[in-house]
Image (tube, grey):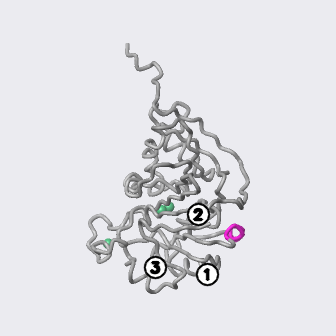
Amino acid sequence: MSTDEEPIESEVPTAEMVVTDAAPERHADTPPLTVTFLGTGTSTGVPVIGCGCEVCSSDDPRDTRTRCACHVRVGEMGVLIDTGPDFRRQALREDIARIDAVCYTHHHFDHVVGIDDLRPFFFDNRRVMPCYAHADTAAVLRRNYDYIFGADPYPGAANVALEEVDGPFTVPILLYHGEMPVYGYRIGNFAYLTDVSEIPEASYAGLDDLDVLVLDALRPDPHPTHFSFDKAVNVARRIGARQTYFVHMTHNVRHAEANARLPEDMQLAYDGLTFESR
Ligand SMILES: [Zn+2]
Ligand SMILES: [Zn+2]
Ligand SMILES: [Zn+2]
């Protein structure tokens, strides 16, 4: 008879999942933000495996794009937007030591599968980390990561609680990624909108008076579930942020060339780019 049936004292206790039904709300007194692009590439990453095109073989470091994620330092707090497959290397590269919350945009592989790499952020504390998501995204995460969010979680699972968005600094922005509802997030006067092909009219109200906008711009050619460059530029113009950065680019986009064709207040982001916002 094995003793494995005894509950194992876990290094990191697993939280119960909480899904609240909170209304979005603007928070005016957000401290200054330091935003770092952890990754700016599409789901394959760039270079693409096995591809020898001029972007995949470019020696411009801005043409190397890991999967999209973003770190926002708000005062002492660290907020993460998405945990893609490159999250571990991104966190090491940027020396990220503290994360207080994760905002998930949607459930696709390139935005979530690094979730287990959140575990080191619990090693020195036993706090539960809230993970915010649209209810549809939360449902998929619950199903796909039963060992984390299920009724009987694995003892060493990440210490996270899945919640529908109501963070101290975040305002969810409803977007559509093809037919799928996804969330963008506004933190202070910074908004991060990735994997989007349509912004519902009502969501524009949450995007006024932005300091910095981050927006999906997949490639020059149209795509059913992402903004192409032309669409992204038009949407960015309408939103009218002081500065717009584009993300989620494919290997059809050479940084230096594409950037030179964009207006100065709209630029391509690249991995490791950091900026301040309010
Ligand atoms: Zn994506
Ligand atoms: Zn390529
Ligand atoms: Zn996606």
Q: In terms of sequence position, does the residue under pointer 2 or pointer 3 come before the other?
A: 2
Magenta stretch, overall SS: helix
Secondary structure beneath dot 3 equals: loop
Query: Residue furthest toward the top?
Result: 1
Magenta stretch in the rendered image: 201-207
Q: Residue at x 41, y 20 (%)?
A: 4
Q: Nearer the viewer, mark 1 or mark 3?
A: 1
Q: At label 2, which amino acid type do we have?
A: Glu
The front one of 202 and 76 is 76
Disc 1 target residue: 237
Q: Is residue 55 visible?
A: yes
Q: In the rendered view of the protein, which quadrant contains the C terminus? A: bottom right
Q: Secondary structure at mark 1?
A: helix
Where residue 243 appears, as percent x and y from the top left, is 57, 76
Q: Residue at x 57, y 66 (%)?
A: 193
Quadrant of image for the N terminus: top left
- Say whether disc 2 or disc 1 marks the residue closer to the N-terminus: 2
With 272 as the anchor, is 106 left or right in this view?
right
Q: Nearer the viewer, mark 2 or mark 1?
A: 1
151 is within the stretch colored magenta = no
Q: Is residue 28 above or below residue 221?
A: above
- Vertical order, 263 against 53 (above or below): below
The residue lying at 60 percent from left, 77 percent from top is 242
SS state under label 2: loop
What residue is shown with label 3? 221
- Disc 2: which residue: 179
Viewed as shown, does residue 124 lie left or right of 206? left
